[in-house]
Image: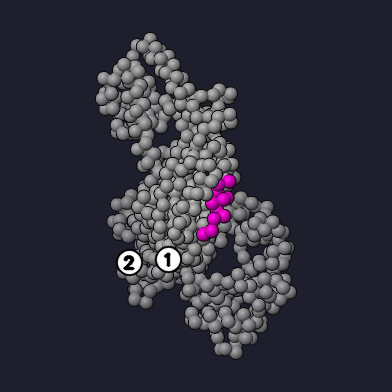
Amino acid sequence: MPNPLSKLIPYVVGEFPKPFLNLYEKMVIPKDTNGKTIKESLWKAYEFGTVRHQGQKRRSGKPYFSDHCLQVANILAKWKMDHITVMAGLLHDTLEDTDTTLKDLEDCFGEDITRLVDGVTKLGNIEFSNQQEKQAENFMKLLLSVAKDLRVIIIKFADRLHNMQTLEYMSKLKQRQIARETNDIYVPLAHRLGMASVKWELEDWVLQTLHKKSHLEIDSKLKSTNRQRSRYINQVISPIKEELKKYQIQVDIYGRPKSHSSIYRKMIARGKTFEEIYDLFAIRIIVEKVEQCYLTLGIIHQVYSPIQERFKDFIAMPKSNGYQSIHTTLIGPRGHMVEIQIRTREMEQTAEIGVAAHWRYKEGKTVTADLDSNVKWLRELVTVLQNESSDPKEFMNLLKIDLFDDEIFVFTPKGDLIQLPLNACPIDFAFQIHTQVGLSCLGAKVNHKVAPLNTILKNGDMVEILTSKNQQPSYGWLKFVTTSKARTNISRFLWRIEKKESIKIGTEILERTLRKLKQFKLLKTIKESYEICGYNSTEALLGAIGNGSITVRDIFKKIRPLNENVLEEAKEESTENFIDFARSSAKGIKLQGIKNLMVNFGKCCSPIPGDDMIGFITRGRGITVHQTSCKSLPLLSEDSDRLIPVEWDVSRKDLFAVQIKIVCEDRKGRLKEMTECIAGENINITSVDAKVKDGVGISLFVIKVNNLRQLDRLIRKLTKLDGIDYVERTGR
């Protein structure tokens, strides 16, 4: 419990402690709020934290509360956060590092602060199998907390920032571990929340930790060239200032060096030395009103020649994190490129500290409509990740997809603006519109022209999605989609299909094996014994049999051990029958010189002679052949011992089914032209599915070919037909 006499300290001593006063002076007190009340509340939290953390030391030997908790609160005050957030910053480690309970906090400070402190508190007593799982679990909890109150992540950033500033006292291994986590998670998340200054500082600390030598070299060269850069900045700025004076525009204009990490990335990406990089700084112009941004832009372009392709208007089209500014790159003195950023003061504040700048204290509630829209992506991400599998690796991969920084802006036919990550394709766009639109996506028009679904979209593209109720996602889509929403929904759909197929196959394997063992009467018993085998339903058990995770013999051993002789006889009989069946199911595949094995071809990629391929031993089903590039190749990393090299038996003349998709302009006689072209190559058509939508014809042909060379020749000839937009092999 806090010392009851501690509240009297300010009155006994005559003043509050200096560290506390320094903190209070940094805070912005709303005009409609009683400053004295806030000061008393803040002192209560300060005194509570001091008592609870009494005797605790950091690795540096300094008192824990004053050297960490107080510094986190100072950072939050610097960001102009409300007093509730600053108080939570003072108390953020009390639940984790002291004997303080949630009830203690709630009794003293109320529900709001307690919820914030609990949201920031790290997972403590939970056991994790590995570091990656721990990282995923921790961050999932963080995201769920953020979805309820954004102040949680802001406090967490302040905590992480101060920890990075004092990282030198940790072991080298721990330093690198924390730095990598910061780089993987907190840096991109800071970007997406618009907290640029936090992002830059975290990046620089990461660089200093992971690439210390490079950081020192860049820092040294920046200091040595500081005077030279200052002279050049003044040379650029002077004519701009003179011209702006003529129009009586009041501006703040200054040059700002780019962060060490930004320079380092440029050196790595461009393969250049420090001396070869000229855009080491950006000139920033701050005006009062939005209209002055555009007037200033026009004036600057009269002074210096702009580079057209490097102009971006983030005022008209703000980034998803709320960032607004005009960026233009000019040819400055001596032919050097100079980036200029033009924004209002409010935009400047938002650009520096992102969502924290939107925070407005009002009766304890701070979420505004604008703020909520800026983090809509975060809440959508939480929803997607909550519905995703519990695999930590997959979770972290999906997370990183949506946190990476670059984005583009595309439009619907109605003119609605859709934000997508860089390298997004029409399928990403379709899922952004609606999940069902994505699942039934048949084709796309980009800028009124039919385009393949793997087309990389660009800024300003107008995209129209063509749908069909008979269309389904394919594994090939996973090769080029970029958003976690698209990837998750496609994977979930394909998983459901695979699950149904596995259950069906598992049922067939179980019944056939029981008949061979003359134990068919045990069918019901086995189906009801799923819990003994470690599964939660009969369907799960049958699916496991179907995908090879468990065999019928394994089940026998668990539920009803048979006489060993019976098992051996059954094994021999089963083996002989397998060989007989295998050799009757030959499809032109050789294994180590042995022909005529039981072969199944993966429906996901449908390999044909000429494709690079690999075999996967499936328990009870022989060998399933996939293309080596097939994304659905099961258990590739975990069960590599079940992968075997296979090759085509070129002496065979078997025909192989393959599906091609033809997109073309709709006109009379089009289908006849395509079928005649296929027939001209002596290729048989087994099925055709042709549809027309909005003047675009989409035809799916299933044909029988001998090899890849024959297929490629056919695709080339079809592409040359008049009015054909493109032809592609599907199901790969």
The kind of residue on which mark 1 rests is Thr
Residue situated in front as seen by the camera: 694 or 249: 694
Circle 1 crowding by C-alpha within 10 Å: few under 14, some 14–19, many from 20 = some
Give the label, 1 or 2, closer to the camera. Answer: 1
Mark yes or no: residue 73 visible: no
Identified at 59% across, 41% down, the residue is 709
Question: Mark on residue 412?
Answer: 1
Q: Between 196 and 613, which is closer to the camera in this rendering?
A: 613
Q: Is residue 724 left or right of residue 490?
A: right
**Image check: 23 left or right of 232?**
left
Residue 286 image point, x, y percent: 54, 77
Q: Please report the residue visible at 28 percent of the width from the left and 23 percent of the height from the top.
A: 523
Q: x%, y% of residue 645?
A: 56, 30
Q: Which one is earlier in the sequence, the residue at label 1 or at label 2? A: 2
Q: CA distance from mark 1 to mark 2?
A: 39 Å
Task: Please tell me which residue is depicted at 72% across the width and 59% down the height of the picture.
Answer: 273
CB under 8 Å between discs 1 and 2: no
Residue type pointed to by label 2: Gly
Q: Helix or strand or loop: what does disc 1 sit on?
A: loop
Q: Which residues are magenta?
A: 713-723
Q: Which residue is mark 2?
A: 364
Query: Does residue 192 appear left or right of residue 365 in this picture?
Result: right
